[in-house]
DNA sequence: TTCAAGCACTATACCGGTTTAGGGTCCATA
DNA sequence: TATGGACCCTAAACCGGTATAGTGCTTGAA
């Protein structure tokens, strides 16, 4: 005898049930529940009371069938299974998105795919089955193959982070130029003349934007910047750090495009026998608990990621409703100065 | 003039369209598409060809309305917004779940909530609106308030990680007893006699199970274990480390219930002037990229988290179909020995 | 030659909501 | 005393599928 209760089909209340108990038709119930005119105050209140009592909620599929909206949005991040790593960013982003969608009674389909082919298949499937009303796109590449597919499908989409990625898709982005200015000013102000920059994948818009923004900001601040491409992984971060610190003219500070590489780079610098921040300063172009985990703690640019997610979700809701949110920007990030950045060594 | 294409409503093909083009009724099309008898070979092939050509996919809402299945499952993790941290575990879990659900043409509603009240509200809402056919429950507490709610609702659920949490819900769990044996054997084999254990929240089943399993395994191995409660955060990990290492009879090895606390604990030990693994050995009861990020790299118990997610999803599918998967266990974890564990100091 | 069986298909109801057209009832105004 | 309008409600269609009952035709056996 199994102790586990077997699953009853558990028929849930419908407006038909309410109608029967209230002695009116389904139509009247619908009017009452949706604040439409067409029912008396008394009937409306009777219906609402019954609905509340029996715990009625609209069947999402029935709604979806009528108004053509799925009441859900999609977000896919693609990472090869083995590379799924430390992504505090996405957790926070999802939390922010959720908060905004909840206000619209919409849900979030979130998942992880192997690569962008798999992601594209998911979007096609979701849209063809009307499972989503729109999607968010993250990690946009230059010539990203997802963009033409979404445009062709007419699937409402908002790009998170790369306004240049598409002429037709809307976007919400962080202000990389501001971040670059803040970082350049920070290091120039401390007296650094030559700084390194360890980036993410070179074909990401994100990377391209940051490299350009940092080059310009550095020029303005009168300092030199050397960018080395990596891929956000700890290994690549360490490798890029070795490359930079073995150069003849060694930079006295290194900026990393994410927290994981920054932490990895810190470890590598220390392994090379360089003290941080005595001989090399370090900063992360993204903050998280990781930056506070190491010794010294890392100076980092901090964004309100949850708000970022909320703004992206808002733009997507507008887009799905037929509007055009265009391209929007997040407020400037703030620099959190911790122990990993200070004046360059006097010798320099 | 906006450059952005305005959103056409984009009417999608229905079986009505297929029926018209094939010159048959919707019913015949439905038979053909679902491999039901009732249509000739010729008609079936004609219908399938048209469906493929115009890219038809069943409208998920229409399907849901008929068979009463939402074609989606839910997963909520709750974390206060500020505490959202490094959760490589969940990313991998989601990847595994997704893979299994995809085979069933089901989707995953994944989100983050502030606390379990918010999570319960989400489950109620999802179930009342028939958005999900079932949910996964993670981080089960002792006397978890989510359990009676789900039981009352009759919402099919599978607990990830704590078979003791509920008599009626099914579960899929890692084998904590095996993990404890492996860790105890590892340290006992190296010659340690007294080890510390920094745990997660004391009211989690997960924590309770590990504390008990480790106590038993240690007794078997003839060594002593001292557990200190923490909460998976870096700060608490560091604090617990200080508590352990300031004891009169200092443990010569410390096991941490997650990777983040282990990394934090390593930093704290080094800050206290203790060499790792020379004076203190360290191991993490969960592996991730974090463990390879620090110096020395951390010895850790490694699970196949994606497979874990896939198994949980499979159990949930069975549960939602009316079956009873009961309580299942994952295969034993494997210990990855890295630089953070070695023989205890000779003095001891 | 007749009848049953089988096949291929149509017509229609149905899932749970929303929406539109229309039908009584009551009251105010001409 | 008709007439019009507002009000409150009902009947029925509809969204996109699936399922069931039924129809007309062919075929084969009695």
Image (cartoon, coloured by chain):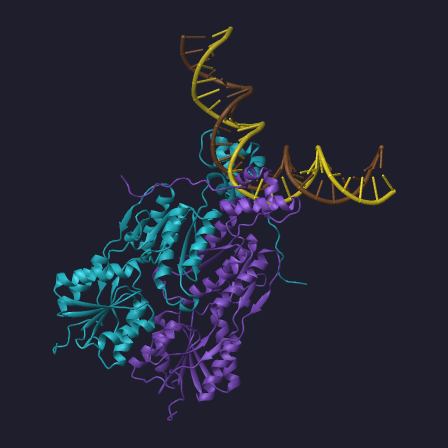
Chain colours: A cyan, B purple, C brown, D yellow
Outermost residue to the bottom = B347
Q: How many marks?
A: 0
Height in image: A88 above or below B273? above
Q: Quadrant of the C terminus of chain A?
A: bottom left
Regarding residue B106, the answer to whether it shows in the image is yes
Q: Nearer the viewer, residue B279 or B211?
A: B279
Residue at left offset 30%, top offset 51%: A172
Please identify the quarter of the rendering in which residue B38 is found: top right
Image x and y of residue A141, in percent: 33, 58
Image x and y of residue B300, in percent: 43, 77
Please identify the quarter of the rendering in which residue D28 is found: top right
Q: Nearer the viewer, residue B145 or B51?
A: B51
Regarding residue B57, the answer to whether it shows in the image is no
Image x and y of residue B252, in percent: 39, 85
Classify residue B106 as left or right of residue C12. left
Image x and y of residue B329, in percent: 56, 70
Q: Quadrant of the N terminus of chain A?
A: bottom right
Classify residue B333 as left or right of residue D20. left
Height in image: B161 above or below B55? below
Residue at left offset 25%, top offset 75%: A243
Please identify the quarter of the rendering in which residue A15 is found: top right
């Amino acid at each position: 005898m199994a102790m586990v209760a077997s699953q009853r089909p558990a028929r849930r209340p419908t407006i038909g049930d309410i109608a029967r108990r209230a002695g009116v038709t389904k139509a009247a119930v619908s009017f009452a529940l949706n604040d439409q005119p067409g029912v008396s105050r008394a009937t409306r209140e009777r219906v609402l009371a019954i609905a509340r009592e029996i715990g009625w909620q609209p069947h999402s599929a029935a709604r979806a069938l009528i108004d053509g909206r799925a009441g859900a949005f999609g977000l896919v991040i693609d990472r090869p299974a083995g590379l799924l790593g430390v992504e505090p960013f996405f957790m926070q982003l999802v939390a922010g998105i959720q908060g905004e969608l909840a206000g619209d009674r919409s849900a979030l389909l979130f998942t992880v795919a192997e690569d962008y082919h798999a992601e594209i298949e998911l979007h096609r499937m979701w849209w063809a089955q009307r499972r989503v009303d729109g999607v968010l796109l993250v990690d946009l590449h230059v010539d990203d193959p997802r963009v033409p597919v979404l445009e062709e499908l007419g699937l409402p989409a908002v790009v998170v982070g790369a306004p240049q990625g598409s002429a037709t898709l809307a976007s919400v982005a962080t202000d990389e130029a501001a971040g670059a200015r803040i970082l350049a000013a920070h290091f120039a102000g401390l007296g650094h003349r030559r700084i390194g920059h360890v980036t993410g994948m070179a074909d990401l818009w994100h990377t391209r934007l940051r490299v350009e923004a940092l080059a310009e900001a550095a020029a303005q601040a009168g300092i030199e910047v050397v960018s080395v491409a990596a891929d956000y992984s700890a290994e690549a971060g360490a490798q890029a750090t070795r490359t930079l610190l073995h150069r003849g003219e060694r930079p006295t500070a290194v900026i990393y495009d994410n927290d994981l590489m920054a932490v990895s780079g810190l470890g590598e610098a220390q392994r090379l026998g360089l003290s941080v921040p005595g001989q090399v300063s370090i900063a992360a172009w993204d903050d998280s608990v990781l930056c506070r985990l190491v010794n010294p703690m890392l100076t980092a640019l901090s964004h309100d990621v949850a708000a970022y997610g909320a703004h992206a979700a808002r733009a997507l809701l507008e887009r799905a409703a037929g509007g055009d949110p265009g391209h929007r920007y997040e407020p400037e990030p703030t620099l959190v100065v911790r122990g990993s950045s200070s004046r360059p060594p006097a010798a320099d």
